[in-house]
Amino acid sequence: MSVPAWAGGLVGLVSGGVALGVAQLVAGVVGPAAFPVVAVGDAAVDAAPAPLKDFAIAAFGENDKAVLVGGVLVVLAVVAALIGVLARRRLSLGFAGFAVFGVVGLLAVLTRPDTGVLDLLPTVVGTLAGAWALRSLLRRATTFTPALAPAYDRAPQPAMVPGASVDDEDARLEEGPEDEPERPAVMRAGGWVPEFDRRRLLTGVAGGVVVAGAATWLGREFGGRQAVDAARTSVALPKPATPAKPLPAGVDFKLPGLSSFVTPNKDFYRVDTAIVVPQVDPDDWTLRIHGLVDRPVELTYADLLGRPLTEADVTLTCVSNDVGGPYVGNARWLGVRMADVLREAGLRSDADMLLSTSADGFTCGTPVDVIMDGRDALFAIAMNGEALPVDHGFPVRQVVPGLYGYVSATKWVVDIKVTRFDEDEAYWTPRGWAAKGPIKTQSRIDIPGYGDRLKAGRTTIAGVAWAQHTGVDAVEVRVDSGQWRVAKLAEVPGPDTWRQWSIDWDATPGEHAIQVRATDAAGRTQTDQLAPPAPDGATGWHTVTVQVS
Ligand SMILES: Nc1nc2c(c(=O)[nH]1)N[C@H]1C(S)=C(S)[C@@H](COP(=O)(O)O)O[C@H]1N2
Ligand SMILES: [Mo]
């Protein structure tokens, strides 16, 4: 007779979809981080304890954000369906459910950096749209037919043909069946009987799905993405005042399966806390440098492009990279030397930390002495000959040879506070990672791969090793804990990039464990002591086992 539970659940789901679609559409105008699902995810990322985050990175790798957003959506779907089931009995319960959603969304948006009043709009409008969809769909699902004996008090209403819905049924939905006994007997005997109308419900649901889908799609299209993409493609990169040294002929062995010396942008690892990548318009971008300086400055993108540019080949590494892991890549960067800008601003002598902040509120603490010691520490605008990809920090990011990314490589950087380590803390420090993060000398076997099956006979073992700003001096390989043998090293343009290595091996039948270790130019050989990534970088020798037959 009245709306069955399954239909209530369906109505709840579709109404939730309408709410999110409309929120997405409004967020497309006011900014992607104001989309409540993303805000909830972002807030969860920031609030999650470090071990959980480490687990997420280890288990899902670069998909960890997609998994998180997927999880939020699944929870939302289940709750929305429940709201629909409840709302069938009492519409006010459904509205209350949506209100709770809305408040959670608003609270999450408010925890985001730089939230303005406008950022609350997607959640508010989305919640209202969802509540409206809930009410309309439930009304559609219920039609009222006259009871067997028509009541004379209702009979004159001309619109009341059997099967038609009535317009003022909120009250009936509100009251629910338990209120029936309070009605006058005559009304019950000859009133209108609510009936579930499956066909009208399903056409309404189809309409809701179309609205939700179209709004989501439009919201994404508007989402500033295209505007920033267009701005990015129209950037004309100036020629470097200080070009990089030409790459030596022998930097790349070009072996199948071995990491190429230059990592193409599309293959470059990505690690950050952003669920939706910040879309920063270079025309609006400025970099403010303040704190322990004599002359605070604010640079525009045009200012930066107008300054002498330095080009440098630098390998980035993430502190959360496991031994043998993928979070390392090498690129040619183009940018302004950070030291020049800081010197002009009048760096004070008591400063020892640069606290940089990104457009999305991530912060990073970099030692001042490292920036000022002459290495190619850059405010980078380009990566491998093109404007920075949005994922990698467009319009401007930091690149500092020798430091893990979490203490040096701020993407979408907008603010630098010159300060002291004993006064300020960056994003990852209270979350269990060291305040300072010099890169540990490491090496990785790329070929053969873990668990590969090989034919007996001559084969090549090869990989990469890195000790940024110190340089790799030697790489050794051993099989089954035998003698260490010295590998052949590729050429490098300088100490700031990784270095390819290779060695031949006469593989004999059976299972074998291959290990590698590097020695840097300071004479430090990698320790065999295994340490996890937290708090300051993994150690140990990369080991690959293979089956030879
Ligand atoms: N804004 C911002 N910048 C950031 C991060 C971040 O979370 N947010 N992560 C850092 C970390 S941990 C690393 S390893 C590098 C990774 O840079 P990539 O994504 O370009 O490889 O970016 C750094 N810069
Ligand atoms: Mo990192």
Image: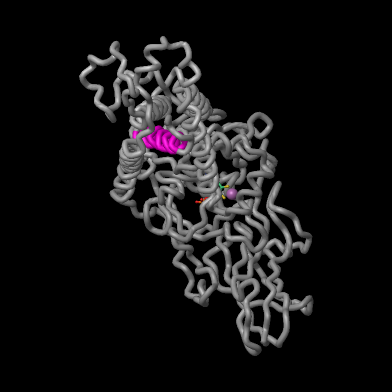
Residue 301, image x, y percentages: 37, 40
183 relative to 489, above or below: above
Residue 32 visible in the snapshot: no
Q: Is residue 261 magenta?
A: no
Question: Which color scheme does this rendered protein use?
Answer: one colour
Q: Residue furthest left?
A: 158
Badge count: 0
Q: In which image quadrant can residue 162 be found? A: top left
Residue 396, image x, y percentages: 43, 44
Residue 238 visible in the snapshot: yes
| Foreground pick, 21 / 474 | 21
Q: Over which residues does the magenta segment extend?
A: 7-25
Q: Residue furthest bottom?
A: 457
| Foreground pick, 35 / 200 | 200
Instruction: Answer with left or right where residue 549 lies relative to residue 245.
Output: right
| Foreground pick, 371 / 354 | 354
Residue 329, image x, y percentages: 53, 59
* The N terminus, quarter of image: top left
